[in-house]
Image (cartoon, rainbow, N blue to C red):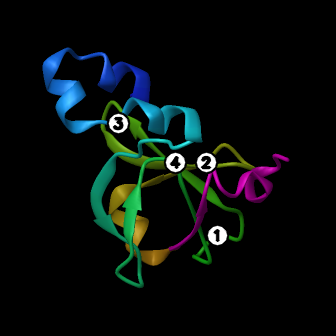
Amino acid sequence: MLSWGWLCDMGQIGSRFFDKDLSDKGYEIMQYTGLKDRNSVEIYEGDILGKGPYPDPFIVAWHIRGWEAKQIADYDYCWNEHFPLYEVIGNIYENPELIGGE
């Protein structure tokens, strides 16, 4: 994932489009997957998917073969064609408690 600092330091291009002060405010850039969940909510990298065929949540991440969701409990994977079976229930930045964080 790209950081705000990296984007803002891209020379004139970065400084035209990105406010460097945002990096100090805790914003995270999340890549859109081009996919939607079963409620037509856009799915982004770092989103947590749940309420699907498997009870444990999945974290959306890029893999060499494409977008995937990694199951937290069993280290199982869900490929992007199954994303529409789930709901976005949060993301790793705003809802770390969903994945066993603080």
Q: Which residues are magenta?
A: 87-102
8 over 61 or under it: above or below? above
Q: Earlier in the sequence, mark 1 or mark 4?
A: 4
> Which residue is painted at 58% across and 75% down in the image?
53
> Which residue is painted at 71% across and 71% down in the image?
55
Element class at badge 3: loop
Which mark, by number, is residue 76? 2
Element class at badge 1: loop
Is residue 34 visible to us here?
yes
* Residue underneath mark 4: 46
Instruction: Measure the C-alpha gap from mark 4 to mark 2.
Output: 16 Å
> Which residue is painted at 51% across and 44% down in the image?
27
Classed neighbour count for the residue bearing mark 3: other residues with Cα under 10 Å, few (<14), some (14–19), many (≥20): few
Is residue 93 magenta-colored?
Answer: yes
| Amino acid type at mark 3 | Asp
Q: Residue farthest to the bottom?
A: 39
Element class at badge 2: loop
Classed neighbour count for the residue bearing mark 1: other residues with Cα under 10 Å, few (<14), some (14–19), many (≥20): few
| Amino acid type at mark 2 | Asp
Classed neighbour count for the residue bearing mark 4: other residues with Cα under 10 Å, few (<14), some (14–19), many (≥20): many
Is residue 43 magenta-colored?
Answer: no
